[in-house]
C-alpha cells in the first residue's frame, strides 16, 4: 500500500497562506477590539475653565458738576504761565515794549477768555485753568469779545 505522501508546501502556497493571514489580520484585530460595539465617539473637548471673576472697578473720581463750583485761586503775576503771557493785574502796567499787541481799553473784562459776569472783579480765564484773573488785567492771550 502506498501511504499518502506528505508534500512540503510550496513557496506559493506558503505566501498565499501568510499573505492572506496578514491581509486578514487588521480586520480581525478590529473586530476583536471592537467587541461588536460601535466605535466610541471622539472625546468632547474639555470645557474651558471659567474666567476669573472680574476685579471690582477702581473708583473713578467724579468730575466736578460745573466749573463754577471750583474754587479758583487768584493768578499771581509771578506764576510762570502768567509771566510767559505777560499777565498783569492792571492792564495799565503792561509793558508795551514787550507786548506790542496791547492797546488801550483792552482788559480781561472784555476778553473772550474771561469767564466772569459783568461787574465781577475776579473770575476764571480759559488760559489759566483753576486760576482767577483780575477783570482789569491783561495778558498776551487777549482776544476781544464779539
Ligand atoms: S486771556 Fe484774556 S481774560 Fe485771560 S488773562 Fe489774558 S486778557 Fe485776561
Image (cartoon, helix red, strand yellow):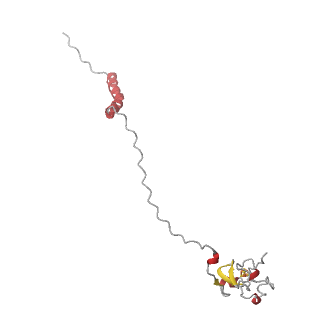
Q: Which of the 4 quarters of the picture holds residue 80?
A: bottom right
Which image quadrant is residue 103 in? bottom right
Direction right: furthest residue? 104
Q: Is residue 104 above or below residue 25?
A: below
Question: Which residue is at a point 61% across and 72% down the rendered structure image?
Answer: 65
Furthest residue in direction top, as rendered: 1
Q: In the shown orientation, is residue 82 left or right of residue 53?
A: right
Q: Position of residue 111 (x, y in %)?
A: 75, 79
Identify which residue, 106 or 31, lies in the foreground.
Answer: 106
The residue positioned 43% from the left and 55% from the top of the image is 50
Label total for image? 0
Q: Position of residue 15 (x, y in %)?
A: 34, 25
Quadrant the C terminus occupies: bottom right
Where does the image place residue 140, in percent across and percent down from the top left? 74, 81
Q: Quadrant of the N terminus?
A: top left
Q: Quadrant of residue 67?
A: bottom right
Task: Name, please, the residue furthest toward the bottom.
Answer: 93
Q: Is residue 35 left or right of residue 120?
A: left
Q: Position of residue 66 (x, y in %)?
A: 63, 74
Quadrant position of ligand 1: bottom right
Viewer-nearest residue: 37 or 104: 104
Amino acid at each position: 500500500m502506498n501511504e499518502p505522501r506528505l508534500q512540503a508546501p510550496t513557496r506559493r502556497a506558503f505566501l498565499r497562506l501568510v499573505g492572506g493571514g496578514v491581509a486578514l489580520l487588521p480586520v480581525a484585530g478590529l473586530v476583536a477590539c471592537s467587541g461588536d460595539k460601535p466605535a466610541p465617539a471622539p472625546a468632547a473637548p474639555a470645557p474651558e475653565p471659567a474666567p476669573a471673576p472680574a476685579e471690582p472697578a477702581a473708583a473713578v473720581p467724579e468730575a466736578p458738576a460745573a466749573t463754577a463750583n471750583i474754587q479758583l485761586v487768584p493768578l499771581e503775576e509771578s506764576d510762570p504761565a502768567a509771566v510767559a503771557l505777560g499777565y498783569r493785574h492792571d492792564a495799565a502796567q503792561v509793558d508795551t515794549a514787550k507786548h506790542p499787541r496791547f492797546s488801550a481799553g483792552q482788559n480781561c473784562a472784555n476778553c473772550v477768555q474771561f469767564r466772569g459776569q459783568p461787574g465781577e472783579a475776579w473770575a476764571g480765564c480759559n488760559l489759566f485753568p483753576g486760576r482767577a484773573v483780575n477783570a482789569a488785567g491783561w495778558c498776551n492771550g487777549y482776544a476781544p469779545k464779539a
